[in-house]
């Protein structure tokens, strides 16, 4: 199969939000708008509980605003949080946003500090089918079992059977919060089928969709293109440092490479402030939001 180069492909960045995540989503959209310049990349949003006022605001800033359905049958469906539709819809993004060649997903609690990473995601997805990050870095707490991330992954894997548990439990977890995938990549249907099967067995929580993608990716060769950790920096594993000269967040380990996408998953970002150390050793309390970083950058 001949694959077109990424610059000829039609591309979209997709995210999702309910009313409570709306401020974070606006930060993500602002980081895209402020960075993409003349890029032809469009934006699509899954509405999983936005207010009418929030929808009106988004309609003026994005190209697509879609309300997803429940893509799988759940026992006690009416009691499931509506925001979970963002997870059940994720393996079906080509159906929700037709007409694109490559789809990039970014969680609403992430934002773009360096636009160049977006180009790399689309390029590698175009070439390899899927470009994605593992939660693996020498600074990350989960690598040393200093937080509960690996335990959550292990417990989530149990729903997929003993063979999968043995195969995947020691592998680095793949994070589904930031990725790019070509729409004809077989991972979409495989991911959907694996997630659907485990849901039918009565297992679903906020970790299941990501674990299903791990089962899909690690269950076949060739592997996708694994991007560096700084392309999806998981702040709950390791807080970034701040380069006071460039005014960019950087990796906490030398040579302090600049972080491209800041991902706030697992952090109470709207109220929580973190002690951020600059390269001179000074500590400043910052909450890591794009709207808080932008004045520093300006």
Image: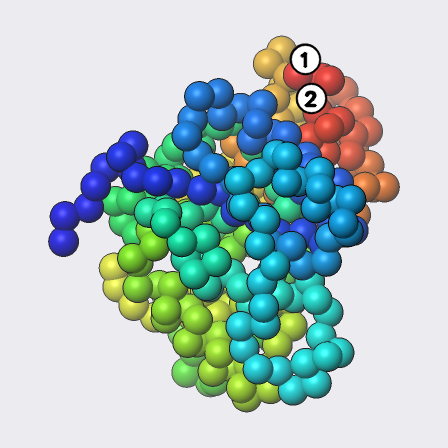
Name above or below for residue 284 compared with residue 71. above
Tell me if I can see residue 255 in this picture: no
Q: Residue at x 64, y 46 (%)?
A: 108
Tell me if I can see residue 274 in this picture: yes
- Residue nearest the observer in this picture, 123 or 224: 123
- Residue nearest the observer in this picture, 62 or 279: 62
> Left of 144 or right of it: where is 94?
left
SS at mark 1 in the image: loop
> Left of 117 or right of it: where is 243?
right
Q: Which corner quadrant of the image does residue 127 belong to?
A: top left
| Alpha-carbon span between mark 2 and mark 1 | 6 Å
Q: Residue furthest left?
A: 1
Horizontal and vertical percent position of residue 148: 67, 62
Horizontal and vertical percent position of residue 244: 67, 15
Horizontal and vertical percent position of residue 205: 65, 72
Q: Which corner quadrant of the image does residue 110 belong to?
A: top right
Q: Residue at x 68, y 81 (%)?
A: 77
Horizontal and vertical percent position of residue 295: 73, 17
Name above or below for residue 95 compared with residue 154. above
> Left of 236 or right of it: where is 184?
left
Q: Which mark is residue 131?
A: none
Q: Which mark is residue 294?
A: 2
Label 2 neighbour load within 10 Å: few <14, some 14-19, many 20+: some
* Image quadrant in which the C terminus is located: top right
Callouts 2 and 1 close, C-beta under 8 Å: yes
The residue indicated by pointer 1 is 298
Q: Residue at x 55, y 52 (%)?
A: 177
SS at mark 2 in the image: helix
Name above or below for residue 197 compared with residue 220. below
Q: Residue at x 60, y 29 (%)?
A: 31
Picture mark count: 2
């Amino acid at each position: 199969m001949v694959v077109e180069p990424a610059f000829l492909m039609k591309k979209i960045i997709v995210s999702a939000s309910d009313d409570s995540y709306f401020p974070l989503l606006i930060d993500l959209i602002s980081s895209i708008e402020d960075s993409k310049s003349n890029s032809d990349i469009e934006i699509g949003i899954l509405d999983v509980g936005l207010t009418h006022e929030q929808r009106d605001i988004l309609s003026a800033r994005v190209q697509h605003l879609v309300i997803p359905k429940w893509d799988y049958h759940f026992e006690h469906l009416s009691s499931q949080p509506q925001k979970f539709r963002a997870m059940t819809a994720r393996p079906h993004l080509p159906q929700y946003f037709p007409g694109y060649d490559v789809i990039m997903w970014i969680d609403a609690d992430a934002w773009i500090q360096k636009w160049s990473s977006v180009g790399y995601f689309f390029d590698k997805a175009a070439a390899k089918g899927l470009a994605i990050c593992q939660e693996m870095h020498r600074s990350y707490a989960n690598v040393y079992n200093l937080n509960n991330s690996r335990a959550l992954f292990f417990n989530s894997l149990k729903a997929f059977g003993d063979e999968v548990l043995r195969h995947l439990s020691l592998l680095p977890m793949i994070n589904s919060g930031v990725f790019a995938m070509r729409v004809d990549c077989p991972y979409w249907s495989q991911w959907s089928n694996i997630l659907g099967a485990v849901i039918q067995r009565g297992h679903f929580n906020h970790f299941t969709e990501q674990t299903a993608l791990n089962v899909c990716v690690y269950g076949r060769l060739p592997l996708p293109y694994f991007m560096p950790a700084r392309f999806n920096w998981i702040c709950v594993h390791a807080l970034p440092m701040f380069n006071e000269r460039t005014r960019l967040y950087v990796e906490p380990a030398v040579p302090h490479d600049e972080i491209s996408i800041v991902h706030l998953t697992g952090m109470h970002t709207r109220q929580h402030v973190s002690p951020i150390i600059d390269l001179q050793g000074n500590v400043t309390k910052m909450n890591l939001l794009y709207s808080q970083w932008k004045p520093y950058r300006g």
